[in-house]
Image (spheres, rainbow, N blue to C red):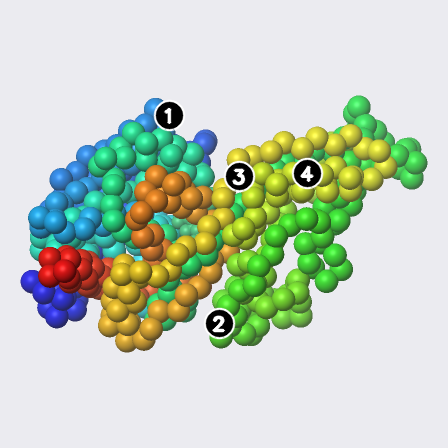
């Protein structure tokens, strides 16, 4: 097997790979608290079987209190480098079923895309790895370790423990984290920067108990209006984040236009984009704040009362270079100072996720760029990501000498975390091929280097 045979080989493997992806999509492996953890265990077991069937030695990895992770290993030829392939087998909740065109856990292909929860985020990542291994008929030219986590969507809480406990099994010279995506459908990318995340709850109380809104309204502030004022202070009139003291960085604009972004996201006509600076800056290297939810009476049940208490979940994305603790402090301070009329305010912090900028060069990056160029027929762009992968910093800390590469089969149409999540079927094949080629090109680089060393 050499790299020239890989395109045909991967093409012939796609029906099996597709089958495996569909098997995984059928398991509702939501890792959030309150969802049946047994499903996450089932997806771990199915992942293990798929890795085993690809010729790997497998085991389920457990850490106290964590959803199970899966490990697969194939030793490489003597002296060859080892590559660690990461993905996650847990998914986000499906949300309201009536918004889905087809059932989230029953895969369906429409217009060249395969729909279902986890089709792109991140069950596609799992099958990219098995495809790469199978393409080499279970005898890759480098050592391969596949590590598939089961709780990325609930913040990878135990990932540092997994890395610590299984450090010797996971050690690698290069790591492919298949949990990002392509720049556009058919246009490959290496993700070189990720935002971090800070989330908190803000609670406002103005009254011991609800009172008649006609009787007291006008003299007494309700908690919901009071909370809204504080939330409104988070942006200026142009939609820039108004919390002082946060880091912002420049970013490569690439070729993104406002029109295209509006189409990708489904922004309604007439709705203005917010913030200043280039579009990529706003999404990748500047802070962004959203209100994710509010606990308050539902309108249907709302009665003529002054609401005594309200609570919001506020999420802030932070760019590389921003310390998460400092960001959280800045946001907390700003919110506390912005709640008007002397209302009681309480901030409850959630965990933070660190931002990360990757060192996007060296032999592993050269090998991956070559693989992308061949597989997609065009060069990969270096892109940023607005989303967060908090464990990247943990990987970098545990394996400081390993090259980290962030890829994935998703694209801007994938609708990750939302209804009608999908993956482009043609891009999935190209992503599988790119990963298979990468293993070959990396092995060739390593051989070159060791030859050079012997000659010297
Ligand atoms: N795959 C995403 C992260 C991502 C999104 C990378 C977009 C590149 C582009 C990942 O599964 C995810 O959603 N992460 C969470 C992290 C959170 C649970 C701490 C996120 O960003 O909300
Ligand atoms: Mn993901």
Q: Secondary structure at mark 2?
A: loop
Q: Please tell me which of labels 2 and 4 falls first in the chain.
A: 2
Q: Secondary structure at mark 4?
A: helix
Q: Are marks 3 and 4 in contact (CB under 8 Å)?
A: no
327 vs 69, left or right, is right
Is residue 169 visible in this depiction of the protein? yes
Q: Position of residue 12 (x, y in %)?
A: 13, 64
Q: Residues within 10 Å of mark 2 (few under 14, many from 20)?
A: few
Q: Residues within 10 Å of mark 4 (few under 14, many from 20)?
A: many
Quarter placement of the N terminus: bottom left
Which residue is denoted by mark 2 in the rendering?
254
Q: Residue at x 19, y 42 (%)?
A: 72
Mark 2 vs mark 1, CA separation in Å: 42 Å
Mark 1 vs mark 4, CA separation in Å: 30 Å
Q: Secondary structure at mark 3?
A: strand
Q: Is residue 207 above or below residue 132?
A: above
Q: Please tell me which of labels 1 and 3 falls first in the chain.
A: 1
342 vs 445, left or right, is right
Quarter placement of the C terminus: bottom left
Mark 1 vs mark 3, CA separation in Å: 19 Å
Which residue is denoted by mark 4 in the rendering?
332
Which residue is denoted by mark 3 in the rendering?
352
Q: Please tell me which of labels 3 and 2 falls first in the chain.
A: 2
């Amino acid at each position: 097997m050499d790299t020239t045979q890989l395109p045909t080989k991967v093409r012939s493997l796609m029906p099996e790979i597709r089958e495996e992806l569909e098997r995984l999509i059928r398991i509702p492996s939501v890792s959030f608290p309150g969802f049946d953890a047994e499903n996450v265990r089932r997806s771990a077991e199915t992942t293990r079987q798929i890795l085993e069937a690809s010729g790997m030695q497998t085991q389920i990895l457990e850490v106290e209190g964590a959803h199970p992770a899966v490990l697969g290993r194939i030793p490489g030829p003597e002296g060859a480098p080892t590559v660690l392939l990461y993905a996650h087998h847990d998914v986000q909740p499906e949300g309201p079923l009536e918004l889905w065109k087809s059932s989230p856990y029953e895969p369906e292909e429409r217009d060249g895309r395969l729909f279902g929860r986890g089709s792109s985020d991140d069950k596609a990542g799992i099958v990219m790895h098995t495809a790469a291994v199978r393409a080499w008929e279970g005898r890759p030219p480098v050592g391969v370790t596949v590590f598939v986590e089961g709780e990325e969507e609930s913040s990878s809480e135990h990932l540092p423990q997994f890395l610590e406990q299984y450090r010797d099994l996971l050690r690698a010279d290069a790591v492919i984290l298949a949990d990002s995506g392509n720049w556009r459908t058919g246009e490959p990318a290496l993700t070189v920067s990720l935002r971090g995340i800070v989330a908190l709850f803000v609670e406002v109380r103005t009254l011991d108990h609800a009172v008649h809104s006609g009787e007291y309204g006008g003299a007494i502030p309700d908690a919901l209006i009071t909370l809204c004022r504080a939330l409104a202070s988070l942006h200026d009139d142009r939609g820039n984040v108004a919390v002082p003291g946060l880091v912002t960085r420049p970013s490569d604009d690439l070729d993104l236009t406002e029109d295209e972004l509006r189409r990708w996201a489904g922004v309604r006509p007439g709705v203005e984009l917010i913030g200043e600076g280039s579009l990529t800056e706003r999404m990748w290297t500047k802070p962004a704040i959203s209100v994710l939810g509010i606990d308050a009476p539902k309108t249907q049940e709302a009665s003529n009362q002054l609401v005594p208490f309200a609570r919001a979940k506020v999420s802030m994305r932070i760019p590389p270079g921003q310390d998460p603790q400092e960001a959280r402090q800045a946001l907390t301070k700003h919110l506390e100072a912005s709640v008007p009329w002397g209302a009681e305010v309480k901030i409850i912090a959630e965990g933070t996720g660190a931002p990360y900028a990757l060192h996007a060069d060296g032999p592993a990056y050269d090998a991956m760029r070559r693989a992308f160029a061949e597989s997609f027929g065009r060069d990969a762009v270096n892109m940023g990501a607005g989303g967060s992968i908090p464990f990247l910093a943990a990987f970098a800390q545990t394996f400081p000498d390993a090259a980290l590469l962030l890829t994935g089969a998703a694209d801007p149409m994938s609708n990750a975390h939302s209804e009608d999540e999908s993956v482009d079927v043609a891009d999935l094949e190209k992503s599988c091929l790119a990963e298979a080629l990468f293993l070959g090109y990396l092995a060739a680089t390593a051989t070159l280097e060791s030859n050079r060393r012997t000659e010297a």
